[in-house]
Amino acid sequence: MTDQHIISAVLSGETEAFRELMKRYESRVAATVIGMLGKCQEAEDVGQETFIRFYNNLANFRGEARVATYLTRIAINLSLNELKRRKRRSLFFWSESDTDLEIPDQNPVKDYTGEKELVQQAIQKLEPNFRSVVVLRLIDGLSTEETASILNVPLGTVLSRLARAQKKLKKILAPYMEGR
Amino acid sequence: MNEKVLDLLYRSFDEELSAAERKYLNEMLHKSKKLRSEQQKIKLIRDSIAESVEQSFSPTFSEQVMARLRMKKQKQTNGIEDFLDSLWWAFKRLALAGSIVTLLFIGLSVIQKGKISIDSLLALPQVNLEETLELTVLTEGN
């Protein structure tokens, strides 16, 4: 069954068919949202909201873009909004994001889970604009052109943000990556 | 390290370099051990980022979304039903009030005239045939 068939079924009143679409794209949305916000309750909420928004706009979905791209666009925009909200909140309350990177293990490079956490924490240290290109290009595996289109910025901007983000990540992660 | 070469190195991961740029970068990579090490570091970081990806929400994620969708649908249905109910309720009250007023007027008419008069119910001036003819004669006389 194609995505378009499922969408038609949902539009004709079979709400349960939407479950199949979620099954197909949950991992993609999770990668984007958790990449942007980290593994937390807000990420779960934004993930849910992404699918709800998609459901509400199914009638307007003409199939010109792939469902994955459409969902990624919603997910990244909602994540960026959530980061703005976090920033506003942090103006009033002390935020943990100002602390140094926590090393989860004495020797994190040998511990796969520890390294994963470390890299995720490092990504969270990037500014939202840099984080979004890293997530779309390096985690979701989109092309630079697709990344530019989803973020609605020129290709050159994506390339320069990617380079700067990687330089920063290298600076943060280099001490923990020695010996690999 | 030469900043220009370093930029070229970063760009090489995300875009197709021109033949001249590719040739220049390869030459520099061949010459500089430090640049090769830098290339390895970038590659390692990119691979670590790709591997760090978390691809699932909680096990109840899809169930929660479906519950929200069902609730939304229920709300929409309830919204229409609520509107129709309130419309019916308002109509019933209006109809009841209208009936009471009509009955009052009929009662009043029966008390005053001893009969049910449509004219008095509708507050029309009551003119009989003789009065009408009299008025016509007077008008013609003038």
Image (spheres, rainbow, N blue to C red):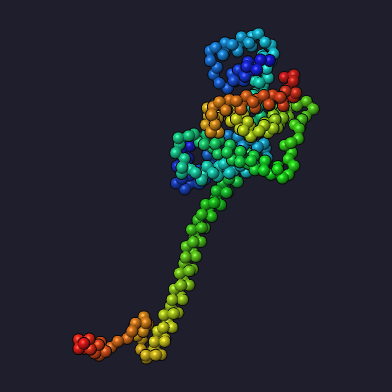
The extreme left residue here reads B140
- Vertical relation: B94 (above or below) A19: below
Q: Quadrant of residue A39?
A: top right
Q: Residue at x 65, y 37 (%)?
A: A37
In x, y percent, where is residue B43? 65, 20
Is residue A58 visible in the rendered structure shown here? yes
Please state the horizontal and vertical placement of residue B142, each as a whole percent of the image. Answer: 21, 87
Q: Residue furthest front?
A: B142
In terms of depth relative to the viewer, which is nearer, B46 or B56?
Answer: B46
Q: Quadrant of the C terminus of chain A?
A: top right
The number of numbered discs placed on residues in the rendered structure image is 0
Of residues B15 and A75, the one nearer the viewer is: B15
Is B83 placed left or right of B59 in the picture?
A: left
In front of the other: B68 or A172? A172
Against A153, is B118 above or below? below
Q: Is residue A114 left or right of residue A136?
A: right
Q: Position of residue B21 (x, y in %)?
A: 56, 14
Residue name at image x 62 percent, y 16 percent? B4
In this rendering, the answer to whether A84 lies above or below B21 is below
Left or right, B37 with respect to A67, comes to right
Q: Residue at x 69, y 44 (%)?
A: A89
Q: Quadrant of residue A71?
A: top right
In the picture, measured across the screen, residue B139 lies left or right of residue B65, that is left
- Image location of residue B45, percent across then percent down: 67, 23
- Is residue B98 positioned above or below B76 on the image? below
